[in-house]
Amino acid sequence: MSTSASRLRVLSLLATAALALSACATTPTAAPQPPASEPTMPPPPAQAPTEAPTAAPAEPTAAPAAEVPTKVEAPDCNYGGSIKSIEAVDDYTVKITLCAPDPALPFKLAGDSFAILDSDYLNQTGGDSNAISNNPVGTGPYKLREWKRGEGLTFEAFSDYWGEKAKTPTVVLRWSKEAAQRLLELQSGNADGIANVGPEDFETVEKDPALQLVEISQPNIFYIGFNNTIPPFDDDRVRLAFAYGIDRERIVRDYYPRGSKVAISFVPDSFAVGASPNIPWHEYNPEKAKALLKEAGKENLEVTLSYRDVVRGYLPNPGAVAQEIQAQLKEIGVNVKIEVKESGAFLDSVTAGKEPFYLLGWGADYPDATNFLDYHFGPQNQQFGKPYDDIVAALREGASTADLAKRQAAYDKVNELLKKYVPMIPVAHGGVAYAYRADVEGAHVNPVSALVFAAMKVPRERFVFVQNAEPISLYCADESDGETFTACAQIFEPLLTFKIGTAELQPALAESYESNADLTEWTFKLRKGVKFHNGATFEARDVIATFAAMWDAANPNHKGRTGTFEYWTAYFGSFLNSK
Amino acid sequence: MAELAPARAEASALRVSAERGRSPLARALRRLLQNRSAQLGMSILAALVFVAVFADVIAPYAYDQQIRQPGLRRRSPPCIHVLGCDPSKPQLLMGLDSNFRDLFSRVVYGARLSLQIGFVTTGVAVVIGALLGAVAGYLGGWADALIMRAMDVLLAFPSLLLAIAIVSVLGTGLINTLIAVAIVSIPVYARVVRASVLSVKEMDYVLASRALGASDVRILFVRILPNALTPLVVVAALGIATAILDAAGLSFLGLGAQPPTPEWGLMLGEERNSVFNAPHLVFFPGAAIMLTVLGFNLLGDGLRDALDPRRRV
């Protein structure tokens, strides 16, 4: 404990000192070269500790409030993150330099968490999630007319949108966590589209000529998570016993709609690499489970299983699946108490590593194994307790090359280790279906990204969509919830987006991008003539300001809702200047 | 007319004397047994109590036992052999629930649970409420003001909302639900008892007892309270119905009994998305709640009629 704390402190001292110095420095010269350990800025790190004690970590935040720097840079690559610098080369060019090659960078930046905000607007709101949610200003095809909390959001088409204008002038986004109610809204004509048709209702929708069913095999995973720091799950044998004691095939066969599959690995096998069909998950074996529990001296175990009662593609029947698991574990002598938690509180608690035994899942943000594995088993993630160093090392190996065979070899190792440690039990890849009224043109479901309402056309004034839950906020930089992204994606845009119905990238706020040969320097050419909803023109400084607010813990706009900026830390590691 | 009158007067005098010949309790009981709604309520409740007591015998399966057979899907509709269901399939009077469990067995065990909830919460609430009300009514003054204002505060909240608030402080679970529902129902009983005590405590027989030197405790518990019981019994009978409903409501919201407990409200809540595609899953638990509440309400109405002093001849 003490060693890591002191290391952190030294790091933060170094970082603050470097920031202070870089603020005094004139415009930066040529971009840094790949060699990670060598800082390009003049101050040698050795100098830092001597003057750092005077500057408390929080202090530099107040001074440069209104200015948007043209370059934000890490002093070196030892701060725990993978980004070296972000720089506005000119008004319409942004260059991102990485500490290590990252072939997935464009995919990562296409996530809704990385949507670009106007820099002045960001300064006005101070990056506060509430302020942004009350008056969101983006570049998207829709702007927010009204958010009646607890009822719905109304979007209206943005007349100065740079691309193809929205096909329906008004869109209403509502929610109901009950599948039956969503279907009823659709059948009665109150809604034009609904998310996640209940697994029992596929046929009803198909038989109704007024409705259309849009099915998709979303790359997702439903898993049963453990926390290896909370008893009894700190005992490897208990987790392994649970892995033997849960019949995943029964769960998928009985509680999942068609199009669902029992998970072989954590990563869906539709991805190029990541799944290991030759390393299948533990076979169901209750006898072995009982023996393991006996060996661990944990007979007549009492545990609490927590989940949120929210329907997702990966978990269409949360309550029934929880009770099925309860029933199955009873057979191996484990008494399970079920605890249903409120969605937001549950996620926060899982992220903070406070849930011992829980049901959760993951839908892909981009079609690569890193999105599944690095997010969950990287060094930052605490949801399974203490990260496993050998898994982290294997993940680094898998992400550092573009050679598919080498990557697969690394991920085979990861899957082997996951099977050994059982930080979670991968259960299912759920099939998903959305339903629309038959007269909706352009009805779609996207495998990895949010719906594009602007592409859907109805022969009516308004398009009404009913999803599962209310968005948490409209500042998605600090959110990780799919329902929230649906709302953000209409208002805000990232540099790149996904083509409708696919997981392929297409240009959005960036017209094009290129990288150097070793994938460490990425240059994005920005689109000209893009207006924000407040009339401001989109320029490179907006990109810098947006990313700096997420990346730099000392940035005055580094606030958000909880300040965790989950996607940033999951993709790029530690914050700059983090304490 | 003139000739008939004496005969009728004589008959009624006879009936009065016949009634006078029995104890007040016996008279009340007789009136209760003659009351239509009480008869219906009591037969429903008798059936329920029977089911609850012999649940182990009546229910063909355990409430958390999964029935897995090839070809038998979860949420299967009822299969009753007498009504022409394929005899090769297991008999399922109310069908299977979402987790392959026999709904009939769960509803049967649910009867036991619901009656327990009703009696326990109401019992606790009656004892505490009656004590508070009696003390308030008998002592008067600041004790009365303090207790009854506290009761007014509790009454100011809608009962279910207050119960939700209490449960969210105590945490979810069946026991906490019982506590919450009991707390919520206390003020009603306190008020009723206090009113009766106030009307009784200045009566001659109480004054006489005091003149003979009886202590306050003796006067309150031996002289006054028995005479304040009548309205309490009526309110308590109706209160059981409310308590069962409140507990079912909490469980429906996921704050009460936790799965796999066969609590009717919980069963309804879990299957709320099945209203259209598997209606039996919500119909039977819903009907069970309705019947139970109806039974207690009818009995309560009957009791009120039977015990109402104005209706005594």
Image (cartoon, rainbow, N blue to C red):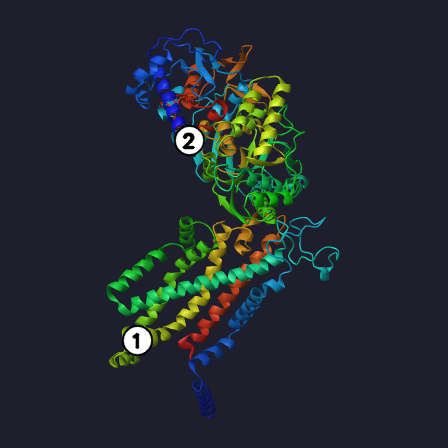
Q: Label 1, secondary structure: give it.
A: helix
- Residue A196 higher or lower than B268, as above or below: above
Q: Where is residue A29 in the image (x, y as percent from the top left)?
A: 41, 6
Amino acid on which the number 1 mark rests in the picture? Ile
Q: Quadrant of residue B209?
A: bottom left
Chain ID, mark 2? A
Q: Which of marks 2 and 1 is in front?
A: 1
What residue sits 67% from the left and 55% below the top? B78
What residue sits 54% from the left and 23% below the top? A393
Q: Where is residue A417 in the image (x, y as percent from the top left)?
A: 58, 30
Q: Residue A133 carries which label?
A: 2
- Residue B119 higher or lower than A92, as above or below: below
- Residue B272 higher or lower than A409, as above or below: below
Identify the image quadrant of the C terminus of chain A: top left
Per the image, the residue denoted by label 1 is B219
Identify the image quadrant of the N terminus of chain A: top left
Q: As drawn, is A215 to the left or to the right of B117?
A: right
Q: In which quarter of the image is residue A146?
A: top left
Q: Is residue A227 visible?
A: yes
Q: How far apart are marks 2 and 1 (CA)?
A: 66 Å
What residue sits 59% from the left and 17% below the top? A402
Q: Are marks 2 and 1 on the same chain?
A: no
- Residue A350 higher or lower than A449, as above or below: below
Q: As drawn, is B253 to the left or to the right of A180?
A: left
Q: Label 2, secondary structure: give it.
A: helix
Farthest residue, direction top: A30
